[in-house]
Each structure stands twice: as structure tokens, then as C-alpha cells.
Image (tube, rainbow, N blue to C red):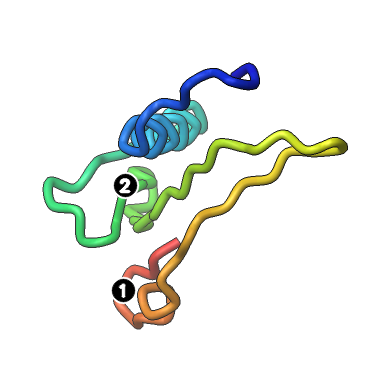
Amino acid sequence: MKRGEALPGKLYVGRSGQLAAMSEFLLRGYNVATPEVDVGDDIFVVDDRKGTLWRIQVKTAIGTERDYCYSGQFLVVLRQLLASIEPILY
């Protein structure tokens, strides 16, 4: 995006990041699914050959241009990362 352009809404940015992550897993041969109810898991990734399931939370940020780089920021609730639910949330 160019400086001064209006940014898309937060929901659009988050969903686009989620779809980008899903497409990358698909290109690598994994099956992906979106849960019907969002309780912290954004996508499920399945290795159909081994029957392995991963719970994934996708974080997306639009970078802010700096003189020498881009930076972005997002929040993760520590309690959610520390919860001992199987399979582990990534």
C-alpha cells in the first residue's frame, strides 16, 4: 500500500492473513479447515497421511513503513498460549 491510502478494515486484514496461511499449507500438501465457532483456533491443519492435527491461530498486521524497515504489532493472550489443551495451539 502507498502512504496515505486508506487501510482496509480490521476484519479484512485478519481474514486475508488467515486465507494466506491456509493457501500456504495447501500448497505444501496439507488439508485445512476453518472451525465453525471461533474460540481461538483460526484454522485446523491436517496431515491426512499421518492423521496429525494442528490447531493454528493466525495473527496478521499491516506493516508501518520506517526509514530502514517495516514494523507491525499484534497481541496474543498469554493465557491462551499456556493452556494445556491437546492438540497444542500454534
Residue placed most toward the observer, 58 or 65: 65
Location of the C terminus by quadrant is bottom left
Identify which residue is drawn at 31% across, 37% down: 11
- Across and down, in percent, residue 58 comes to 43, 48
Residue placed most toward the observer, 2 or 57: 2
Location of the N terminus by quadrant is top right
- Across and down, in percent, residue 84 comes to 35, 82
Residue placed most toward the observer, 8 or 48: 8
Mark 2 residue type: Ile
Label 2 vs label 1: CA separation?
A: 15 Å
Q: Is residue 42 above or below residue 85?
A: above
**In this rendering, the label closer to the viewer, 2 or 1:** 2
| Label 1: element kind | loop
- Across and down, in percent, residue 36 comes to 12, 46
Residue placed most toward the observer, 37 or 47: 37
On screen, residue 68 versus residue 47, left or right, reads: right
Mark 1 residue type: Glu
> Badge 2 local density, few (<14 within 10 Å), some, or many (20+)?
many
Label pair 2/1, CB-CB below 8 angstroms: no
Residue for badge 1 = 86
Identify which residue is drawn at 57% across, 52% down: 73
> Badge 1 local density, few (<14 within 10 Å), some, or many (20+)?
few
| Label 2: element kind | strand
Identify which residue is drawn at 36% across, 38% down: 10
Mark 2 or mark 1, which has the lower sequence index? Answer: 2
Query: Label for residue 43?
Result: 2
Q: Is residue 83 above or below residue 66?
A: below
Identify which residue is drawn at 40% across, 30% down: 16
- Across and down, in percent, residue 70 comes to 73, 38
